[in-house]
Image (spheres, rainbow, N blue to C red):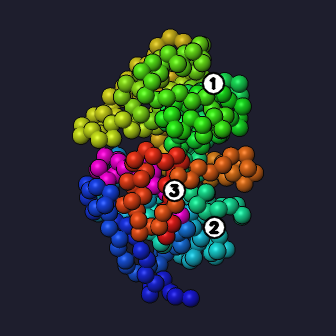
């Protein structure tokens, strides 16, 4: 077997604020894992909305350019460093990386690895790492929606949206989902009630379907959509915001923008009827309570993957493309023409 010191990896580099075709392929020696680390031979890496923001320099806390993007990955542990159980070698794992996933070999903290059950397609698993954890935590940890209640999911045809729809329906929750008309048949097949997100009377259509309001609204759009979603809540309902996609191409100060959102949510939560608004942070608690954060991540992804294994939910693969075609993959993901998640295969 080739040693890590002589093997060569392939990675995709984001050099700065560029168009998708500005990404470039780089080759360099594989780095051996250090103490507490593992070398993962990557089988699949996802293309997320985060990378769309990062290539515009608009993702909070992103590294300085140049860097290797890639928010999550699935692969097999090829080697471990000192202090890591040797039994991990050969184990298929998933890991949320935030950056660094678009590569053939990734060195990661072994504590962040989440074992993947046998028999699952790594590409299908990849679609459910960040998307599945996000959807599960928003539904069950943030909004705490109960069976029989109704929720509103914006962007229901996207990667997080389609996962959220399936998790909700599996839990006996009614789903109203906004999406483009071409995605409506797929959403109906998943048990959702679709609405055209371009409908000028979108709020009116939601009120027709849920006259008493919705128990929770999941909104990744931002801007005026947050206010509309909050207005559609039933008494005691929760708005869970998890992005500002409608502001993707803005050039305003990010910190000022988020401060305004948090201030508005705080004021809304003081209004009558017990309605609340919160902004979901995938990385919340990682720095302050890292052990609890990792346990929660592992438990939630394992729950989602168990549903996948048992055919209770289906992975939504928008496209599978070679790692070297990352630029085309990003352009495809940004085009809005695919349902589900675009996956890179090294």
- The answer to whether 217 is drawn above or below residue 325 in the figure is above
Residue at horizontal 69 percent and vertical 51 percent from the top: 308
Provide residue 17's location: percent of width, then percent of height: 25, 54
Residue under numbered circle 3: 319
Residue under numbered circle 2: 92
Which of the numbered marks, if any, corresponds to residue 194? none
Q: Nearer the viewer, residue 86 or 65?
A: 65
Provide residue 179's location: percent of width, then percent of height: 50, 34
Q: Secondary structure at mark 1?
A: strand
Whichever of labels 1 and 3 marks the residue nearer the N terminus, that label is 1
- The answer to whether 229 is drawn above or below residue 319 in the figure is above
Task: State the separation of the CA atoms marked 1 and 2.
Answer: 37 Å
| Residue 39, visible in the rendered structure | yes
Q: Secondary structure at mark 2?
A: strand
Q: Nearer the viewer, residue 336 or 44?
A: 336
Q: Which dot, 2 or 3, sits closer to the camera? A: 3
Q: Secondary structure at mark 3?
A: strand
Task: State the separation of the CA atoms marked 1 and 3.
Answer: 31 Å
Whichever of labels 1 and 2 marks the residue nearer the N terminus, that label is 2
Tags 1 and 2 in contact by the CB under 8 Å rule?
no
Which stretch did the figure color magenta? 44-59
Q: Which dot, 1 or 3, sits closer to the camera? A: 3
Residue under numbered circle 1: 150
């Amino acid at each position: 077997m080739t040693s890590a010191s002589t093997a060569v990896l392939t990675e995709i580099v984001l050099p700065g604020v560029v168009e998708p075709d500005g990404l470039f392929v780089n080759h360099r020696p594989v780095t051996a894992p250090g103490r507490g680390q593992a070398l993962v031979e990557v089988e699949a890496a996802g293309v997320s909305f985060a990378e769309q923001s990062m290539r515009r320099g608009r993702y909070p806390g992103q590294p300085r350019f140049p860097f290797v993007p890639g928010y999550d990955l699935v692969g097999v542990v090829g080697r471990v460093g000192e202090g890591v159980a040797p039994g991990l070698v050969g184990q298929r794992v998933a890991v949320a990386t935030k950056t660094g996933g678009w590569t053939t070999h990734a060195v990661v903290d072994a504590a962040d690895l989440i074992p993947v059950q046998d028999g699952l397609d790594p590409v299908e698993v990849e679609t459910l790492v960040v998307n599945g954890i996000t959807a599960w935590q928003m539904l069950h940890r943030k909004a705490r929606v109960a069976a029989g209640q109704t929720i509103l999911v914006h962007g229901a045809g996207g990667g997080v949206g389609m996962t959220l729809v399936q998790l909700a329906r599996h839990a006996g929750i009614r789903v109203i989902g906004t999406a483009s008309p071409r995605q409506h048949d797929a959403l109906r097949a998943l048990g959702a009630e679709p609405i055209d997100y371009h409908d000028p009377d979108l709020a009116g259509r939601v009120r027709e379907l849920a006259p008493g309001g919705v128990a929770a609204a999941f909104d990744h759009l931002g801007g005026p959509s947050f206010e509309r979603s909050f207005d559609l809540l039933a008494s005691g309902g929760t708005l869970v915001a998890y992005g500002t996609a409608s502001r993707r191409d803005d050039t305003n100060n990010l910190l000022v923008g988020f401060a305004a959102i948090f201030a508005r949510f705080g004021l809304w939560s003081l209004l009558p009827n017990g309605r609340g608004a919160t902004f979901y942070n995938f990385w919340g608690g990682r720095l302050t309570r890292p052990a609890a954060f990792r346990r929660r991540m592992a438990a939630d992804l394992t729950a989602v993957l168990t549903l996948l294994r048992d055919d209770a939910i289906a992975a939504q693969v928008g496209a599978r493309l070679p790692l070297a075609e990352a630029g085309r993959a990003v352009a495809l993901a940004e085009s809005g023409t695919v349902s589900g998640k675009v996956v890179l295969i090294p």
